Amino acid sequence: MPEGQNVHGASEFREGVWRVVMSRPLSDGDPNDAILDPRGSAAVVAFAVWDGSQGDRDGQKSVSSWLALALPQPAIGFLDMWAFMLLPLLALGLSGLVIWVGARQPAVGWAGQTAGRTAAEAPRWSQPPEH
């Protein structure tokens, strides 16, 4: 492989059609290579084909228009979802705290009555002083 060339390829001519597969690392630190990031936006690419049997010579070749190369997103793993799992756990914890604190307070029903006591007998949070 020529120096600076890190693209591997294979081709096949079958049923009148060429099939070509090229591969290279997504990023290799070479400033001349485009960085391909599956989490980023699509890269813009173009292809050139030189076919000597069709009269292509020297720099004369067929060139494609610009194409958008979008890479598939990587699968989401457990560690990628930790923030989404933390929110329901936090909500459950806060709900439990509210229930625990609420269970420690005296039960006050409708019309100021508490369980088994009249409003006058029930303790109040803020009772005005009697004169």
Image: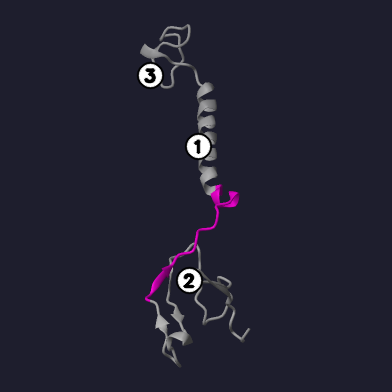
Identify the image quadrant of the N terminus: bottom right
Distance between the alpha carbons at the discs numbered 2 and 3:
93 Å
Q: How packed is label 2: few (under 14 Cα within 10 Å), some, or many (20 or more)?
A: few
Callout 1 touching callout 3 (CB < 8 Å): no
Q: Where does label 1 land, which residue?
A: 91
The residue under label 1 is which amino acid type?
A: Ala
Residue plotted at (44% across, 78% down): 47
Circle 2 is placed at which residue position? 17
In which quadrant of the rendered image does the C terminus lie? top left
Residue name at image x 38 percent, y 19 percent? 128
Q: Which residue is mark 3?
A: 128
Left or right? Give the position of 80 relative to 123.
right
- Identified by mark 3, the residue type is Pro
Q: Is residue 98 magenta?
A: no
Question: What's the image's color scheme?
Answer: one colour
Residue placed farthest to the front in the image?
15
Q: Disc 1 vs disc 3: which is toward the camera?
A: 1
Residue 34 placed where, x, y %? 49, 76
Q: Earlier in the sequence, mark 2 or mark 3?
A: 2
Mark 2 and mark 1: span between their CA atoms?
A: 58 Å
Disc nearer the start of the sequence (2/1): 2
Q: Which quarter of the figure has residue 48?
A: bottom left
Residue range corresponding to the magenta coloring: 65-82
Q: Is residue 21 above or below residue 117?
A: below
* Viewer can see residue 131: no
Pair 2/1: label in front = 2
Q: Earlier in the sequence, mark 1 or mark 3?
A: 1
Give left or right: position of 52 versus 130. Answer: right
